[in-house]
Amino acid sequence: MLDDFKAFIARGNILDLAIAVVMGAAFGAIVKTFTDGIIMPVIGFLTGGVDFKDKVINLGEMPVATPEQIAAAQAAKEPMIMYGQFINDIITFLIVATVMFALARYAVRMFNVLAAAPTPPTGEEVLLAEIRDLLKTK
């Protein structure tokens, strides 16, 4: 059973998937930083200083006028609709989708270029072509 497990883990597909998951997590962190640190401040500037993270609809009793109050209400499990975070997540998703689309498009172009490039004839094919040409002349 241990040998079967080792063979299963050593398969290329499993290793590729594990690498993809780790790379995806790292890419997610980069996108989150990019969104929170670059995109959202620009959007906040363009909208007059609005910080979407602070946009909530309070369904509970605690006040949620400041980020500290929002954090306290979250810690107290107060019911809130955090539509601002939802907006942030949509923007993050759109950034990830755009980058993935660009990567997929680039990969398809590269595969098409590689597939369209003719492979040089093998030595056997060259020799056969020479024999064919000699036979045509006789």
Image (cartoon, rainbow, N blue to C red):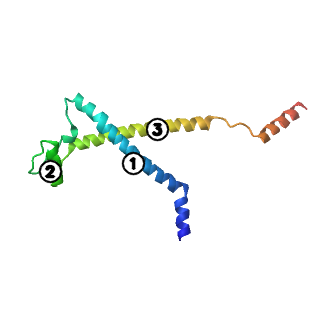
* First in residue order: circle 2 vs circle 3: 2
Residue behind mark 1: 25
Residue behind mark 3: 103
Q: What residue type is labelled 2?
A: Ala
Q: Which residue sits at x=29%, y=39%?
A: 36
Q: What residue type is labelled 3?
A: Leu
* First in residue order: circle 2 vs circle 1: 1
Counting from the top left corner in percent of width and height, residue 126 is at 79, 37
In the rendered image, the vertical position of residue 1 relative to residue 71, given as above or below: below
| Closer to the camera in the image, 8 or 29 | 29
Q: What residue type is labelled 1?
A: Ala
Q: Which mark is residue 73?
A: 2
Query: Label 2: how many residues lie within 10 Å, few (<14), some (14-19) or many (20+)?
Result: some
Counting from the top left corner in percent of width and height, residue 110 is at 55, 36
Q: Is residue 125 shown left or right of residue 48?
A: right
Which-is-in-front pick, marks 2 and 3?
2
